Every structure is written in C-alpha cells, then in structure tokens.
Amino acid sequence: MNLINELESLVAAEWKSALAHPRLAGFFDTSAGKDRTIVAIYLIQVYHYAFHTARNQALVGANLANMDTHYMQFCFEHALEETGHELMALHDLKSMGIVFQSRAEIPPPLPFTELLIAYLYFISTQGNPVQRLGYSYWSESSYSFIRAFMDMLIYTMNLDKSQMTFFYSHSHIDDKHAKDVVEILQKVCKTEQDWNQVKKVAKTTLSLTNTMFHETFEEFLKIQRGEASDYAFIKDLIIQSKPNQTA
C-alpha cells in the first residue's frame, strides 16, 4: 500500500466510525420533527470555520519554515480560491429565513468549532508546514463520504439543494482541489515523518469536526428544552419563514 492509499484508508475509517455514531441520527429524528434549527446551527459553525480557511491556508505559504516554492504557490493559490466561501453558508441560512445584517449579529462559534479554528492556525504557523495538508486532504474530498448523509438530511428537513449550496455547489469546486492536494502531497512529503504528521493532522481535525456535529446536536437539544442559548432566536426565525423560501 502506498502512502496516499494509507492516508485514504485512515480518512475512510474515521468517516465510517463518525457516520455510524448513533448521535447523528439526531439530525433526522428530532422531537420537533423536521426542525431546521439543527441545520442552521451547524451552518453557522460552517460559516465560522470557512471564514478562517483562506486565512490559515495563506499563513502556511507565509510560514518561514516553508522553503518549497511549489508548496508556497499552492498555499497562496488555494487560499485565494477559498476566499469568500463562507458566504455560501450565509446564503443557505438566508434561504431558511435567517438573515444577518453584519458579522457582529452572528452567534459565536461553539467551543469545538473554536478549537478546530485555533488548531488550524496553530499547525499553519508552527512545526512542519506540510502537516496542514492532512486537513486539506480530507476536507477537499469529504463529499464522497458525507453525500448520502447530506441527501438524507435535505430530504428529512424538506430542503432543496439550492438551500445547501455550501455542500453541493462547493463539492464541484473541491473536486479540482482534491486532485491538487494529492499532487502537492506527493511533491512535498519526502520523509516518513512528513507523512506521519500529515496523518496526525488528518485524524485530529476529523475528530474535532465530528465532535462539532455532536456539539451542534447538544445545542439544539438545549433550545428544545428552553435553556439559555446564543442560538435560541434561530428557531423563531425559521418558524416565521415560509417553507422552502429561497434567497
């Protein structure tokens, strides 16, 4: 098995374990039925981490330890292509009746979303610059693993694909990115240590992302129980909006 295949097997095993977790059934079997609040909470997490993706990717290119000009070019080009993708999440929220007039109105990220963001900044500026490719590798190809989950989600919540553009439209953009990541991995990972660090980051960021799913569900349950939450207002906005309202 070559090193790319080893990385692919690791990512596939992590996704298989994550998607088999009973908690994810909560996205489809809520006490309120087809309650889009849970989707909206998650889309706000998507907005937050996507807002930082281009920024921490660019920092890898600016990292003084990054001496590979091909990798520097990849980082800056990829950062440019990721710029503004968080706006897709805002579009999807708007289609559900949730409109923010400014960034200040958006609820803060949940703790594990913050941890993911902070971790990506850390690995982008500290240690071996190639390690962030562990995150790039799976994030650019995640749709092949979660497509069935997303299809079931929009069916259950009576959504349209035009209301989940971050996942469906973004997936076409990421098809090219995924190929680019494999190509640069094969160019810049020259030692066993390089590959081990890439795999470590892949596993860590997948773990943080999957925990973010569970935390989203916990926040949804808090709202259902009437407990204090920065996201409580979302439910009222969704109830007031028309079904399948588009942006």
Image (cartoon, rainbow, N blue to C red):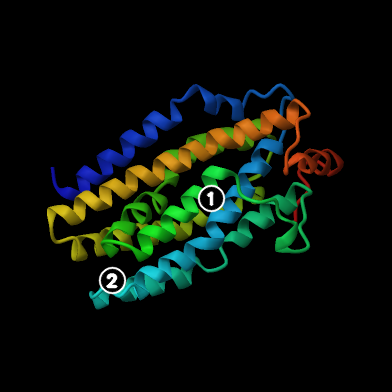
- Element carrying mark 1: helix
Q: Amino acid at mark 1?
A: Glu
At 20% across and 43% down in the image, what residue appears?
A: 6
With respect to residue 138, does 173 lie above or below?
below
- Please state the horizontal and vertical placement of residue 189, each as a whole percent of the image: 19, 60
Q: Quadrant of residue 65?
A: bottom left
Q: CA distance from mark 2 to mark 1?
A: 27 Å
Choose the circle earlier in sequence order: 2 or 1: 2
**Residue 114: which numbered mark, if any?**
1
- Please state the horizontal and vertical placement of residue 140, each as a whole percent of the image: 40, 54
- Please state the horizontal and vertical placement of residue 22, each as a whole percent of the image: 50, 22
Q: Quadrant of the N terminus?
A: top left
Q: Which residue in the protein does label 2 denote?
A: 71
Question: Nearest the camera: 204 or 236?
Answer: 204
At 25% across and 45% down in the image, what residue appears?
A: 7
**Residue 26: which numbered mark, if any?**
none
With respect to residue 24, does 127 lie above or below?
below
Q: Is residue 153 left or right of residue 71?
A: right
Question: Nearest the camera: 133 or 81?
Answer: 133
Q: Is residue 54 left or right of residue 15?
A: right
Question: Nearest the camera: 43 or 196?
Answer: 196
- Element carrying mark 2: helix
Q: Is residue 174 left or right of residue 50?
A: left
